[in-house]
Structure formats: C-alpha cells, structure tokens
Image (tube, coloured by chain):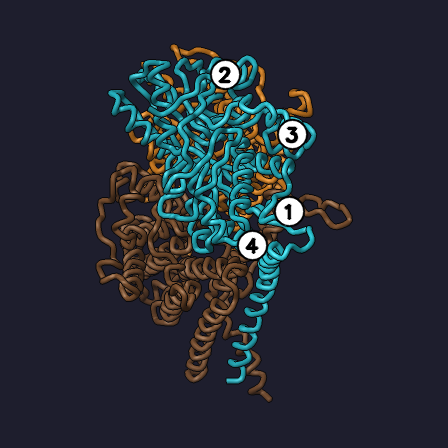
Chain colours: A orange, B cyan, C brown
Amino acid sequence: MQYAISILLSGISLGGQYALIAIGYTMVYGILRLINFAHGDVFMVAGLMMVYLSAALPLGLALPLVLLLTVLLGFLIERAAYKPLRTAPRMSVMISAIGVSYLLQNLATYATGGLPQMYPEIPGLSATVTIAGTSVKWATVVTPFLVVALVIALTQLINHTKTGMAMRAVAKDFETAQLIGIRLNAVISVTFVIGSFLAGIGSMLYFTNYQSVVPLSGALPGLRAFVAAVFGGIGSVPGAVVGAFIIGLSESVIKGSNWSVFSDAFTFALLIVILVVKPTGLFGEKVTDKV
Amino acid sequence: MKKVLALILALSMALSLAACGGGSGGSTTGGDTQQSGDSGSSGASGGDTVRIGVFEPSTGDSGPGGKQEMLGMQYANRVTPTVDIGGKTYNVELVYADNGSTSDKAPTAAAELVGKGVSLVLGSYGSGVSMAGGPVFDDAGLCAIGVTCTNPGVTVGNDYYFRICFLDNFQAQVLVNFAEEKFSAKKAYLLGELGNEYDQGLITFFEQTFTGNGGEVTKDSFPTNTSDFTTYLNKAVSVGADVIFCPVSIAYATQIIKQAAAMNLEIPLLGSDTLDSNKVLEAAKGSSVQLYVSTFYQEGGSPEFDDGIKAWLNEDSTAMTNNGGDDTIAAVTAMGYDAYYVALEVLKAAGSLDLTAIKSALPGVTYTGVSGAIGFDDTGDAVRDTAYIKTSDNAAGAWALETVQTAS
Amino acid sequence: MKRESKSGAWMVLLGAAALLVLVTALENTLNPTSNIMLFMALQKGAVYALVAVSMNLLNGFTGLFSLGQAGFMLLGAYTYAILTMPVENREAVYYIYNGCAVNFSLPELLGGGPVGLVLGVVIALILGGCAAAAVAWLIGLPVLRLKSDYLAIATLGFGEIIRAIFQWDKLGPVTNGANALKSFPTFSSFNIPGGLRLSTFMAFLLAGICIAVIVLLINSTYGRAFKAIRDDEVAAEAMGIHLAKHKRLAFCISSFFAGVGGGMFVMFANQAQAKTFTTAMTYEILLIVVIGGIGSVSGSCIAAFLYVAASEWWLRFLDTEIILSNGFKVPFLRTGFRMVVFSIIIMIVVLFFRRGIMGDKELPDLLRPRRKEGAGK
C-alpha cells in the first residue's frame, strides 16, 4: 500500500513537472508548427543558472533573476534562430532547433566541465513531509496544485485578453492573422516568453526533487514532455497537462513493475500508438489539408 | 573530356594537399620520437622528451572521473618530470586525447595518440572506451596501461592492453562478502544504468555470487539520463531488501543518494569504485544515508602522497576545479599517480623508446605504489587481491575506512 | 542531352576510380602510424557519407522527415557483428552469458581465408541491411501514414525502443546485453600483413558501391517518383504515383543502406554497443545532410568528410590549453571548447548558408553551365 502511494506520488509530481515543460512545446507548436527541440535545454540552462546565481546572490534575488534570464533566453533563441527562417521550409527551422539544442548542451558542458552541479535547497520546497508513511519533498506535493493554478491563469490569458485572442488567431491561420493587423513577431515572442517562464518554474520544481544538474538533464524530460504534448493533442494547453500527467504516472508505474528496462521505450510506444490511432491526440482539433 | 581531367586533377590535388598537410604535421612528430630514440643511443645533448599518451574522458558521463584520474598523472608528472632511459635523461610530456566517454569517439582519440607518436598510453577511466580504443593501439603495436577500467573484456584478446586495477568479478565478490558479513544480507536490490557495460557487468557478477551463496536478488535498470529514482528506491523498500547495490556513474550516484536522503532510506547503499568521488560525498553529507564503497585506495595510505597532492590542489585552482572543488583525494587519482610511475618503470626496463622493447619489457615490470603492489599476469591484468571498503562519514563529509577485504 | 548525361556518368565513374586509386596509393606510401588520423578520418568519413546519403534519400529526395537512422544502423551493426564474429572468440565476448546463442560465423562457414573473409563480410553487411529494411517495412506500415513532424518524432521514438530492446539482458545470449560485441572482422582485417594496406580502400569501396546504387536509383523512374512526392504529394498522387508504395519503398531502401552503414560503422569502431547508437548520432547525420545540402548526394559526401575531420581532428587543438612562447595563455581554450566552436559553426551554416555546400546540385552540375557558355561562343 505504502509502495503504491509512493509510486502514485512520484508519478503525479513527474507529471506536473512534465506539464510545465509540455505547455511550452504545445504553444510553440500551435503557433509556429515547430517542434522546439531546444526547449528541454532551456529548462536545463534555467537549472544551471540557479546553481551559479544562488552561489553569488541571496536566494530571494536569485529566484526572480533566474526566471527573468530564462525568459530572456527563450526570447533570444526565437529572435536569433527561428525568426530568420520564418519563410524557410519547416524542416530547416526544425534543424535550427536541433542546432540550438546542441549548442546549449555544449555550452553547458564547457561551463560546468561536465561535472554534475548540485541544485541549491529552496526553503519550503526542499523540506520533507510524510504522507501515508512515504516521506517526500514539499516540491512533490506543491507541484500538481501549482500546475493547475498556472494552467487556469494561462487559459484565462488565452481566452480573455487581447494578446490571447491574437495568439489564437495566429494559431488558427498564420496569414489571415497578419492581414487583419496582428503583429506576428510580437505574438510569437510572447509565446516563447510564456513557454520559457513555465519551463523556468518547472526547472525549479524538478531540480529541487532531483538535485543534480548535468548538460543532458533537459534532454529526457524535454522529450517526454513533447510526447505528453502530442498525446494530449498538440496546440491544446489542457491537453498537454492531461497528457503530461498520464505520461508521468505511466512512467512511474512501469518503473515500479518488472519491466523497468522499457520505461523509456514504453513512453515512445504509447506515442506511436496514439499517433496512429488518433493523430490529433486526445484534445486536438481535426485539421484538413487544403490542396 | 578536358573538364573531366581538370576536375579529377583538382580533386586529387586537393586531397593530396590535405594528406600532405596532415602528413607533414604527423610525420614531424613521428620523426621527433625516432630522433630522440637515436640520440638516446648516441648520447647526444639533453632536451629530449618522451611522450606518454593520456587516453581519458574529460567530457561526457565519465568526464568527472576521467579528470580526477588525470590529476594523479599530472601531479606525478610535476613530482617526477624526467626519466632515465638507457642511461639518458628524458623529459616526460603528457599528451592528452579526450575520448568523450563514448565508444564512437574513442577510436579517433586513440588514433590521435598513435599519430602523435607517444611511447605508451595510460587510461582509460571507463571500460567501454578502452575496449573501443584497444584495437587501434593493438594495430599500432603501442602498449596501453588501463588505470581503472575494471571490465574483464578490456585485456582479453588484446596483447597490448594491460591494467593495474582489479577486475569487476573480484570487486563484486568483495562487496558480496562484505554485505553478508556486515549486514547478514539475504536479499539485495541491484540497480544499474541500462546498456552500460560497467553497471551491468558488476550487477551480473554480484547476482551470480550472491545467489550462489543462497541469497535473493531483485534487478532493475534505468534508462540513460533518468533523474527520478524514488520509485526504484521505494521498490527496494517494498521487496524488503537488506542492501541496495548501485554501481552507477557519479552523476546518477549523486541523484540516488540525494533522493535516498530525502526519503530517509534506512537500507545501506553499496557502491563500486565509481562512487568513490567527492561529489558523492558532498551529496551524502548531512544526511542519514549509509553508504559503503569498494575502492582502490584510502586516504592515509601514503601520507607523503596525500600531503603533496593536497598542497598542489590548494595552490592550483584549475586542478581544484577538476577535482570537484575540494581536496578530498579520489582513489582514481591515486591510481593515476601509480599508473604514471608504472609507465616510467616500464620505460626504464625497456631501455629505449622502441615500441617492441616496451612491449616485451612491460609484462615483467613490478612496482609498489601508493595503492599497493602492482604486477601483471598472463592476460595483462594486475595481480591484486585487496580492496578497501570505505563508508561515508556524513557528519564530517569525509570517507572513513570500514575494512580491507580480500577475495576468498 | 542523352550524350551529356552519359558523359556525366563516365566522369563520375572515372572520378570515383581515381579516388580509390589515390586512397590506396596514399595508404601504402604514407607512414601509417604518423598519419593515422588521416586514415581514421577517411574511414569514418566514408561510413558517415554512406549513412548521410541514405538519410538524404529519405529526407532530401522523398521529403519524408525521418529521425530513425541510428536505430537502423544499430540493427545492421548487430547483425553484422553477430554473423561475423569468429566462433572461438564468442565464449570470451559473451562471458556473462556463457557463450553465444548463435554459433556460426559467416567468414568461417565460407571456408575462412581471404576469400571467406571478403565474402563473409559482404554477405553479413547485406544481411544487416536486410534486417534493417525488414524492420523498416514493419514499422512503416503504421508510421508512414503520419505527416512530417509526427513522422520525425515517431521514428525518433522507434530508435529509442530498438535500443532498449537490444540492451535488455533477457536477450543477452544473442545481443550480449549491455556489453559490447567485439573481435569481429574490422577494416584493418583487410590489411595484408607485410603487404598492401587495404583498410581505407575497403571503406571507400564499400561506401562507394552503395552510394552508386543509391545514385542509380535516384536517376531511375523510382527516383523521379520520389522527387514528385517530395514536391507535391497531392499532385504526385494525381499523376498516378502510388503514394504508400513509393513511400514504403524509399523508407525500406534508406533503412537498408543505413543498416549497411551501421555494419561498416562497427567495422570502423572495432566494437558494437547499443548505447553508441543514440539520437545524438541521428542528429549528427542530419546535420551532415544539411551542411552538404538537402537533396545533393555529392554534398552529403563532402560534408561527411568535412564534418568528421573538423570535429575529431582539425579542431581538437581547441580542447587543450595553449601557452604561447611569450607566456601568453590563449583564453577560452579548455575541455569542451571544441564542441562549442563546432556547434556555433553549425548554427552559422544553418542560419546563413541555408542551402548548404551544394544546395540541391551535384558535383558534375557545377561544370555544366560553363560548358554551355563555351558552346555559345
């Protein structure tokens, strides 16, 4: 029983952290039709910045600064690596995303010398609490609630503000949105800013739980979060969150079973199945190709 | 048709230019060694150098360990920068090639050393890269001395690969004995990285010995880049394991220990030589995790070496960073230090820089280093029967010697 | 027109033959020890050229964005290694599993000696390709219905699944689990002791033949159908091209050559281990294709050699500290800097030289416009 609860808890907390990354993927894909491969690495860089900044500054200052820098990084990546390719074929943009991810990982290796960096303790989040005999960190408990709160805020933003309306318009039809006077670049930048902000928060929760940061830390969570986004129906924020929780829980359950060898493979098998059975995901909208 | 000819000519010229460019660079270095060999016999004036190749990872998963191993060699090179070969004094130059911890980069890294005309190679930390680089050394007739590559496959079938450390089956046996003596363990939980020959090899040997003695094991493998180990640790609790054996690389070990600390795990963790790192110690500091690792060297084994290297680490900031930010001595550093001196012994015994002379002299060399007596058997493995088991003193953040084990 | 393409073909053939002769000559005249980096780079370059061309066939010529190349290479690599490893070495290599479940070796079955070796290696490589193609056919059934990005991510996932299966210890008696397969024939097995050195020649010959087959395919009616699919699926279908059939064909052929390339890769790397064939490797190959120019075979080949030489040879000096004679320490140089510089170069190519080295042109194309000028005079 205690074991089952521990699996459930770790699944939910993983799911929550994946959700925060998945939102970034799903929003960018919804608007640019681009799999932003560098998103997982932005998440990793946010973790590293926290390690370095918290060593130099008090935590109260470091936390907001990390979020600010992460947002700035996301914004700059879009401006430098994706904006020049707006008219290029989609494959070029995707390759550019892979290139950025490669660059970020190599920069991180250069900066850290490949040594694992210890994430600082964040008061409150790092403390442990015992739930039904299993002791976990507060970060684990807080994650699902925080995710739900953030998602509600985000859906409000998308559905009830002018920026949100512009984002929906761009997602629906790129060219028409431009025609009716929506400033495309501004909308895309806002998308990247929101995505990076959430990835920054996600990295704080994630690395408080799993404390060492290495250059490849972002790769696996990034890929899993992307699978979650596809699973939930890419382009849909609630879909990404639901998908993330499903992926997180199933990963945890597989790890707990005798098939732990295939915990990664299972995630991808799930992805292939969902793509084949229901290519638009759980909550995705059906799109028809125009000739 | 003229165009065709022109094209072919241009292409071949470009290629041969590139070849000559690379060739001339390479051949000068090759020539150097040749010359120094000659001048050695004729007794010409000093300033000659002998090159020792350092085949170690400084990036990738094994980067931290590889760097610590290199520190030992660098320190030894500082202490003893010269060697007398055939009655002549040579300066020893360390030549580095980063094998990036992956076996697809290892052959070119090995080739880099061969091309630079080194006389002997030391390394690597990690067995996979050693196995990938091995045939390159074998082809070139260049001897390599493995420092801490413990997988049996490294030396088997390769006449030119030797090593100064113990093997995985020995290490696993030592840890099984320890687990049974200290904890009367009947059930063990084994956790390793999927597809990593080091982890899986040790786990298999541990399982064989442990079940052979009547014990019971549960095995799990986690995929590369996993960070969430809580489920695995909870599983160990739920199967009622007496010990957890996790011979994983440093980055994973720090994660596992941190998460074990957060869930107040009461089961002792057993680790292999990779866990003997100050990053692991740092992770365990201040927690209630019981951690035991088997290793090659325990600080205090040679006070002279300890003091010397600590003094160097404290004055050289780059070395300190490479050691993980403090001056705790890792066993791999001691092994790197010993490896350097073994290399010098080999060169002295060979009496020249000729690769065949080195090859024939190497198996007969014996040396007593800070980590104990070193000699080679027929396959080229070290003759070793002792391993140190140390435990982490979580209050002080230091290693404490638990026991010295010999395989029975 | 016809005459021109014929002379083009002759030209390519002659060029390839000249290259082979040159490589053999270099290998046997230059000191093999001091020039080892050159030959290593040439061998790895040849392998990567083949894999890059096979990826280009899919991504550049058929417009199917697949990221499963490393997975198919893994299949070919393991098939090759298992089929060619001498029986006497199996006990030592599979020491954890007490010997191998497969107890024959193709070169030995074929009578051993040089003839057995060459035949065995070639047959094993082809079988490796077939294994990859068969698996490609199976996963192609569901996956090829997906559109661009989804196909990319599904094939990426497939690569990860394959890797996990090969690392699974229950299959250990066949795959050797996490342990590497080794002591099978490699490129250096083709060096005749005391005689000709043929290792680099072998790499070039094998890669050359495979690339030639791909080129012939691209210039056939199938190749034109592939290009039609790339340019406009709907129009291609309207023209009577069977979409599903041609996509599957391209996918299987590309995987076949990726499998052969995988076998050749382990001949270069001296050992086969599943953890080498990661997504990172697929990305490397993709970057080669992009640098060379999507849709250009000769571009992929040139880029493969440049990429390998730059990342593993020419830029290596960036990893070590250099102190100039006047005591000035060159800043930034330390471990990892090489890869930073290298990834910046890649980003520059991706952003500013989007068409890569060759665009979608081939080497012979470069000469043609000039010839027309000459004709005008």
Residue A138 percent coordinates (x, y): 50, 16
Amino acid type indicated by mark 4: Gly
Instruction: Please determine if labels 1 and 2 lie on a single subunit.
Output: no
User: Which residue carries the number 1 mark?
Assistant: B89
Res. B117 mark: 4
Of helix, strand and loop, which one carries label 2? helix
| Chain letter for mark 4 | B
Q: Quadrant of residue A228?
A: top left
- Quarter of the N terminus of chain A within the rendering: top left
Q: In the rendered image of this protein, does residue B321 appear above or below residue A185?
A: above
Amino acid type indicated by mark 3: Leu
Viewer-proximal residue among C28 and A72: C28
Mark 1 vs mark 4: give the one in front: 1
| Chain letter for mark 2 | A
Q: Which one is earlier in the sequence, the residue at label 1 or at label 4? A: 1
Residue B331 percent coordinates (x, y): 51, 28
Mark 1 vs mark 3: give the one in front: 1
Res. B313 mark: 3
Discs 1, 3 touching: Cβ within 8 Å:
no
User: Which residue carries the number 2 mark?
Assistant: A138
Q: Distance between the residues labelled 3 and 2?
A: 38 Å
Q: Distance between the residues labelled 1 and 4?
A: 19 Å
Of helix, strand and loop, which one carries label 3? helix
B121 displayed left or right of C143: right
Amino acid type indicated by mark 2: Trp
